[in-house]
Image: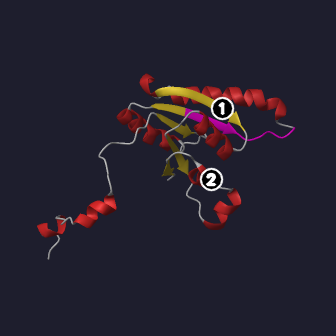
Amino acid sequence: MTATDPSLFTMKHSSTDKAVMGRVTASYPRIQRLLVPLDFSGKSRQALRYAMPLAQKFSAKIHLVHVLPPPDKAQLADLPRMKQAAIKRLGEMSALLPPRLRAGNAVLVGKPAAEILALAGKNDIDLIVLTTKGETGLKRTLLGGTAQHIMQHAGCPVLSVRRR
């Protein structure tokens, strides 16, 4: 048998195949709202580049979010300025989207994974598109793993784009 042998590509279906598959429909999942968390790094824009064609395909809206870490006492006075700067940068990122794909922008303060998951639940998000740093082993354990936490606890599918 060679790699071009047509019998390699034909499948014989038995009655047990139908029982195993059940009733599979050919419809697409309904994706109306995508959430893209951004940390404003050059690599986090990769998530937006993946989200745009998905949103276009499904006529979905893209929500952008940036989460500021909880400030310590010394940073508390700078929090309004930091929020304004983040709002401005999200607006710049949102301007890259065609108007029909734009939804809301949010700047939140807190633990990133918890804030992103809460926002996704509140806005009935259908898909979260995020980037990961690709850390493994001890480094990931020490640094936390926001993307990993979101993937494990999200109430919707998560598309993870590995940073390069």
- Position of the N terminus, as image quadrant, is bottom left
Mark nearer the viewer, 1 or 2: 2
Q: Quadrant of residue 133?
A: bottom right
Residue at 79%, 31% in the rendered image: 78
Residue 149 disc label: 2
Colour approach in the figure: secondary structure
Label 2: how many Cα within 10 Å (few below 14, some 14–19, many 20+) = some
Which residue is depicted at the point 33% across and 56% down?
Answer: 22
Point out the residue furthest to the bottom here: 1
Q: What kind of element bears circle 1?
A: strand
The answer to which quarter of the image holds residue 79 is top right
Residue 53 to residue 137: above or below: above
State the extent of the magenta-drawn residues as a range.
64-73
Of mark 1 and mark 2, the one earlier in the sequence is: 1
Residue 72 in magenta stretch: yes
Could you tell me residue 65's position as x and y percent? 60, 35
Which is nearer the eye, 74 or 63?
63
Q: CA distance from mark 1 to mark 2?
A: 20 Å
| Nearer the observer, 24 or 44 | 24
Residue found at x 30% / y 62%? 19
Q: Report if residue 41 is visible in the image.
A: yes
Pointer 1: what residue?
A: 107
Q: Secondary structure at mark 2?
A: helix
Magenta highlight on residue 20: no
Q: Residues within 10 Å of mark 1 (few under 14, many from 20)?
A: some
Any mark on residue 33, and which? none
Instruction: Indicate the position of residue 33 as horizontal and vertical percent values.
Output: 48, 34
Residues at circles 1 and 2 in contact by the CB criterion of under 8 Å: no
Relative height, residue 38 to residue 96 (above, below): below
x%, y% of residue 126? 49, 39
